[in-house]
Amino acid sequence: MTTVVDSANERSNASDDNELRLQRNIGIMAHIDAGKTTVTERILKLTGRIHRMGEVHDGAATMDYLAEERERGITITAAAVNVEWRNHTVTIIDTPGHVDFTVEVERSMRVLDGAICVFDASEGVEPQSETVWRQADRYEVPRICFINKMDKAGANFTEAVESIRDRLGANPVPVMLPIGASEHFTGIVDVVKMEAWNYKSLEEREKIDIPADMQEEVEAARKAVIEAAAERREDLLERYLMEEEIPFQELIASLREGVVKNEIQLVFCGSALRNKGIQRLCDGMTAFLPSPLDVPPIQAVDDKDQPVEVTCDPSAPIAALAFKTIHDRTGDLTFLRLYSGTLRRGDALWNPRLRKVERVGRLMVMKAGDREPVEEAKAGQIVAAIGLKNAVTGDTMCTKEKPVILESMDFPDAVISVAIAPKSRGDRDKMGEALAALTREDPSLRHFSDPETQETVLAGMGELHLEVVVNRLQSEFKLPVEVGAPRVAYKQRLRRDIDVEGKHVKQSGGSGQYGVVNVKFGVSDEEEGLEYVDSVTGGNVPREYISAVRKGIAGVMTIGGKSGFPFVQVRAELYDGKSHAVDSSELAFQQAGRIAFENAIAKAGVTVLEPIMKVVVNSPTDHTGDVIGSLNSRRAEIESIEEGKGGFSQVNGYVPLAEMFAYATQLRSMTAGRGTYSMEPARYQPVPHKMAEEILKEARERREKK
C-alpha cells in the first residue's frame, strides 16, 4: 500500500514539476512611448488571446483598460493577462512607463520571474529605462531586451545596444539583427539559427537568404553569441577553442543559463506596430526566461522570527504575497503570487500582519479588465482572489498552522499634495470611503486630515498622479470634488541640539495629572524618523511611562507643529524627570513628551527640507542654452549635458520640486513643442534660509485661516 501511495505522489510531483517548467511570469517594462503596450498587444494576438488588435493611439489597447488610460494613451496601472505559446503558459504584466506610476513597476518586479525590457530603436536607453532597469536589478529579475520601432526615422540598432551596455552596465548579446532600418526595415536575421525572415504580417513571414551585405555583421554577431554561451560551461569552451561545432540545443541551454543567472541579456529586435519580430520575441520569452523552478527559494521568517526558505512546491503549505489590489463594486480583487502550496476556492488564509483569517470567495486569472474563474491555483502562478477584504499590498497570505512572513516592499514617500473637498457637504463620508479604496489600491497615494486646518489632504508622486486620482473620484465614484493648488511635501528637522523640560501638571479636584520629563533633542545621523534613547536612572520616570514619552514626541513629529510639515531625523534622549505616586499616568507622560518636543522646536528652531527631483530634459540642440537658463532660474544643479542623436541634446540635473510646477508649458514654448522631460524623486535637502522663512510663514497663515 505504501508503495502505491509513494508512486502516486511521485507521478503527481513529476506532473507538477513539468507544469511549472512550462510556466513563465514576466513583465513588459520600458520608458514611456517605447511601445511596450503595443508589443503586448501583438503577443496577445499572436498567441490567440485576442482576435482583434487595438492600438494605443486609438485608445483601444486591451491592456489599457481603464478609462483614464484610453483617454491619455498611456499605461497607468499594471495589467495582467495569461497566454499560451509553444505549450507554455505565460502570465504577462504590462507595466507603466511614466515615473508618477513607478510604484506599479516596483510591485510587479517583486513577484515576477523574468522581464522583457523594450527600447525605442532611435532613442536607446531613456531616463525611465534606467529607473525600471534599477528596479529589476533590485529584485534580481532576469531580462531579455527588445529593440522596438526599427521602422522609425533615426532607428539605429547598434547604438541602441551600446546604450544598454554603457548606460545600464548590462551585458547585451544580440541574437537577432535587423535587415535595414527606418523605412528600409523589412525583416530580421536569427544569428543563432542562421536564418533570415521577411515579414508580411504578424503571422505570415517568408524565409529568405541572409543578405550578402550583412554576412560579415552576422558572422561577428554569431561569434559573440557562441562566446557568450561557451563562457558559461567548460565543455562548450573547450569545443569553441577547438573550433568544433556546438550543438544547437546545448547552445540554447547555455544561453538560457546565462539569462537566468542575470549574467547576460539577449537582444531581439523588430517593429511591434508593423508586426515584425514578435514571433521570435515570443520564442525568446519561453526559451530563455526562467520558470518558477529556476528561481532560488524565497527567503522568509516564521512566527518565531526565524529565517525559513519557501520553495516552489504545490504540495507544501500555502505561502503567497499580495502585491496589488483593485477596487471593484462587486468585490475587491487581491492579486496573489503563489510561492508554495495549492490555493482553492473557499480556502481560509491567515494574514500574519493582522493576525486574522480571511476566506477566498473566488479565484480568477486575468485578461486585463476581464476575468476568468478558476477552481484552484498552484505554486508559481499569479491569480486574483475575491474575498480578502483586509489584505493590502505587501501582506503575506499563508496557513494558520504553518505561518510565514515573506519580505514586503518599500515605496517612496509622496512628494506633492493637494487639499481636496467634496462639492456637497453631504458627500464627505462618501469621499472618505472612496479615498480609502484608492489608497488601498495604491501604496504611493496617501490621504489624511490636517488636524489644524481640518482639510483633507491627498498626497502622491506627481501632478499627473494626483490628476488621475481626482478624475477617477469624479468618473468612477461619481463624486464631484474641489481641489486646491498643488503643495510640495516639505519636511523639517531641528536646527540645533537643545536640552528642554516638558511639564504637564494639572490639579482640578480628585486625581490630577502629573508628568515631568527632561529630554536632550538633536539631529539623528542614524534614523530617518525618531531615534529614541532611554538613559533614565534612579526611577525618576517609571519604566511603564518611558514608551508614553516616546509616543508624545512621535505624535508632534507626525503633526509637524505649527507649520504642519512632518519632522525627520529626530534624536531624543530621555534622561530625567519627575513623577507623582497618585497623579502620574501614561497620558500625563505622553503629554509631557509632546510639550518637551514643542519647547525644543520653539527654542532650537527648524531647518525646512524640500524634495529634490532628478530631471532629464531632451530638447533640440539649438535650444539647449534656453533649457539650461530656464533650469538655472529654477534653482537647478546641472549635472551633465549629453549630445544626443538627430540634433537633440539631453540635460541632466537636480531641481527642487517646488520650482517645477507648470514647467511642461514653458518647455513646450521655448522648444517649439519638441522638448520633453521626465523627473523622479532623488533626495531631500535644506531650503535656503530666506525661502524657508517664507514657506513657514505661509504654512502657518494657511492653518490659522482655517
Image (tube, rainbow, N blue to C red):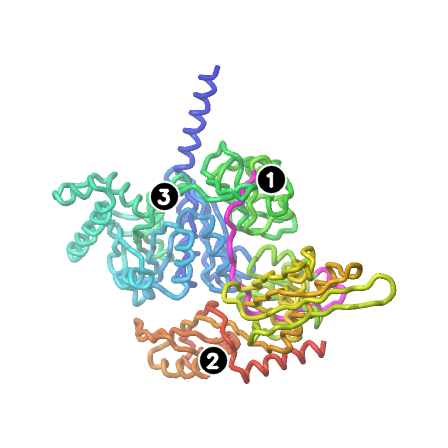
Q: Earlier in the sequence, mark 2 or mark 3?
A: 3
Residue 177: percent from left, percent from top: 25, 55
Magenta residues?
Answer: 403-430
* Residue under the image location 60 percent in, 36 percent down: 347
Q: Which of 219 and 417 lies nearest the eye of the viewer?
A: 417
What SS does tag 3 mark? helix
* Cα–Cα gap, marks 1 and 2: 53 Å
Give the labeled residue for mark 2.
666
The answer to whether residue 557 shows anywhere in this view is yes
* Cα–Cα gap, marks 2 and 3: 46 Å
Give the labeled residue for mark 1.
349
Q: Earlier in the sequence, mark 1 or mark 2?
A: 1
Q: Is residue 140 left or right of residue 490?
A: left
What SS does tag 1 mark? strand
> On the image, which quarter does residue 581 sit in?
bottom right
Q: Is residue 26 above or below residue 628?
A: above
* Mark carried by residue 551: none
Q: Give the residue at the far top of this rendering.
A: 1
> On the image, which quarter does residue 556 sit in?
bottom right
Amino acid type, label 1? Leu
* Residue under the image location 64 percent in, 41 percent down: 357
Task: Find out whether residue 12 is within the magenta segment.
Answer: no
Give the labeled residue for mark 3.
286
Residue 33: percent from left, percent from top: 42, 63
